[in-house]
Amino acid sequence: MPPIEKRDPKTRRKRWTVMLYMVASKDERTESAAIRNVRELQDFGARDDLNLRVQIDRRWPGYPERYRITKNHKADICRYDKRQRNDSGTSEVLHDFVDWARKDAAADHYVLVLWGHAFGLGFGRDNGDPLTLPEIAAALDPKSFGLRDGETAVDILGVNACAMSYAEAIYELRNAAKFLVAPEITMPFAGWPYAKVLGEIVKSPDIKPVDLSVKIVEDFVTAFEEGVEPRSVALTAVNLRAAGDMQRHLAELTQTLAAETEDVDLGDEIADAFVDTTHAEVRPLIDLVDLCDRLAQLNDRRASPIVKAALKLSLFLKTDDDAKRLILKHKASGDVDGLSGLGIYAPSVTGAADLKRLQLDRGDYDKLALVRSLIDEKTHRGWADIVFTDLKRLLSPLNQAIAEFVNGTGAVGADPGSVAADDRTGVGQLLLSVHRSFVKLGKAVSDAQRQLTGMSNGKANGHVLGATRQKPAPGVVFGPPFLRLAPRRESTIPAKAISRGALQASAVIDQPDTRLLLNSVTPLTNLEDALAYVEKTTKQVMTHARLGLGGDDFKGDLGGDDFKGDLGGDDFKGDLGGDDFKGDLGGDDFKGDLGVLSALTAAAGTTGVAPSSETAAVAGMFQQVSSSLKLLEDAVATIENDLVSATSNSISGAGNDEYQRRATAQLDQSFRDLQEMIANAKLTVFRVLSHPANGLGPTVPAGSSTVTRQQLAIAGGLSSRKLRLL
């Protein structure tokens, strides 16, 4: 073990300098949150191996100030020429702060945290002059600090702001730092747990930047999980050195996509993949890993080049090879599903209002280094052409149909002229996502019916339902983790021999009855996954913070009176609603009984609250939807039970033909029942979402929150306690 280096604390460089660049001049709430974080640093204080430097631009005094936080917990203001450098939205001011901090508090390693509101393609929009990605890259250009090739002005670039972990940012900032720590979703006002992060440095001063980046992610999510009011949070640590490899794989995918979007049928499949891709609150930002996985599932044979390119990029993004890994660590709270931690912009999947709010126009987007690098030299087409032009053309008919539906249902009010364009766009997007989830479910049902009835008629690998003379291995993958709705049984097949979603007969499993079960599980697995997607999408839409169900009683369950509770959006509006619910939407038992609601709200942890008639109405709407989805689960479980029963009976001789006929007839009937229930469930969901009083759509919030949508969703049965696939 090498000897520990002994250095004089009075003369040696410290191990770490942490810098906060805070743009907090927008409003009182932002300013207060910034001051709280500065005080957290001050309470912690500088240490033998830790320097702390802060520049904060707030409403008062109206210009940036610099602070040196000392060991005695003071925040000493530093001399700073504010007159010439008073715009925090310029690369010159950011560069000047980092240069000053590096000289004033020289260290072995540097962490720079950008603290403030997000901005489309950059950061810090408070004062009307945001820092764009190219400006941030210019401010941290190693050459401007006199550094050698391979060196960076900061080791870790952290982002205490919303949604800055995306491909365009990573590539733009690839030379600005070694590692980026940023969220793919919104950032709560509480921000990073700075005391915990600084504690990691003090505890292990020799910690490597890569390890500290990972620790920051872990500490951040843990801090919110342990909080009094848990929040939906996520954070990602990215290795910026791997950005070049990401670009090469993405360039190949871009070329294959650009070559096929002109094809009508294949183009529609590509558009479906983009629209269906998981996304967070900033809709134009979709998850890159999920997009690759969806493109890799394209069925058209002409999509083979796209499938190969998408698989290559997906494998790169998921690699566990430390030398090549781009996503070092992604962690999210339990209620954040489907996100990998890395997004990419696809502007045409959202409305013009969102693009205007983010100031995400084609001209600025085309200037980004990644976007420019993805243009094919022969065709002169690139990623921007796909996501701005091709997708817009492909999605136009469906968007128009959704718009007509919105106009006809009254989901956003009877008078279209009274509804803001962004609200109408938002409602349309939500309805579209639910519609597409049901379309996917219908396709999964058709595929499963075709494959399973084919088996029952002896068309699948020569196997016939009920044709086996011996009882098969009990419960072969009929049960968790492969089938979640079928009865749990002991399996004799090792789990490692089977992969969920791509189940095939294994060479080591040579019993005919066992191969039959394996072949039948794949379509059932896909069916369960499609139904789970319907449940998840429906719940997300109904509990949407800005456009979900309910009215004046609901002021937002995602962070307060509006989405300003997070550091990403200045016009995420308050939650919605309308008048009291008057009619029954199809639930025979629900009559708006406040006694029933009292039990629901008690289950949601809101005892002592006197529910309004509107709250009762919304609770009933959640009940109706959850009940209809539970019926779908029961219908799928019936199909699974029919199949396992048919394959587990020992039938031989002449009686086998009659058993096969009956088994096939029963399976067909179960599928017909499921199709009917899907139609009824879709009707129920859309009647709820389009209700003119408490369906989707905006209103002016009034009063304080009583019962949140999330609480009513759980109490009404739209939760994993009732729905096994949710």
Image: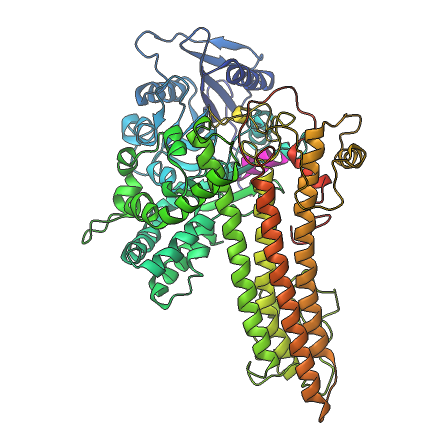
Determine the residue located farthest toward the bottom in the rendered image: 653
Colouring convention used in this rendered image of the protein = rainbow
- In this rendering, position of residue 25 left or right of residue 42: left
Residue 480 visible (yes or no): no
Residue under the image location 70 percent in, 37 percent down: 619
From this view, report whether residue 468 is shown above or below residue 115: below
Residue under the image location 42 percent in, 53 percent down: 272
- Boundaries of the magenta span: 214-223
From this view, report whether residue 622 is shown above or below residue 83: below
From this view, report whether residue 187 is shown above or below residue 71: below
Q: Does residue 216 belong to the magenta stretch?
A: yes
- Please state the horizontal and vertical placement of residue 484, each as a whole percent of the image: 67, 60
Q: Quadrant of the N terminus?
A: top right
Residue 79 visible (yes or no): yes
Q: Nearer the viewer, residue 7 or 212?
A: 212
Q: Nearer the viewer, residue 698 or 62?
A: 698
- In this rendering, position of residue 279 left or right of residue 381: right
Q: Does residue 710 belong to the magenta stretch?
A: no
Residue under the image location 38 percent in, 46 percent down: 242
- Please state the horizontal and vertical placement of residue 170, each as a whole percent of the image: 38, 39
- Please state the horizontal and vertical placement of residue 509, each as a whole percent of the image: 62, 79
- Give the mark count: 0
- Please state the horizontal and vertical placement of residue 641, each as a whole percent of the image: 71, 69
Q: Nearer the viewer, residue 563 or 434?
A: 434
Main SS of the magenta segment?
helix
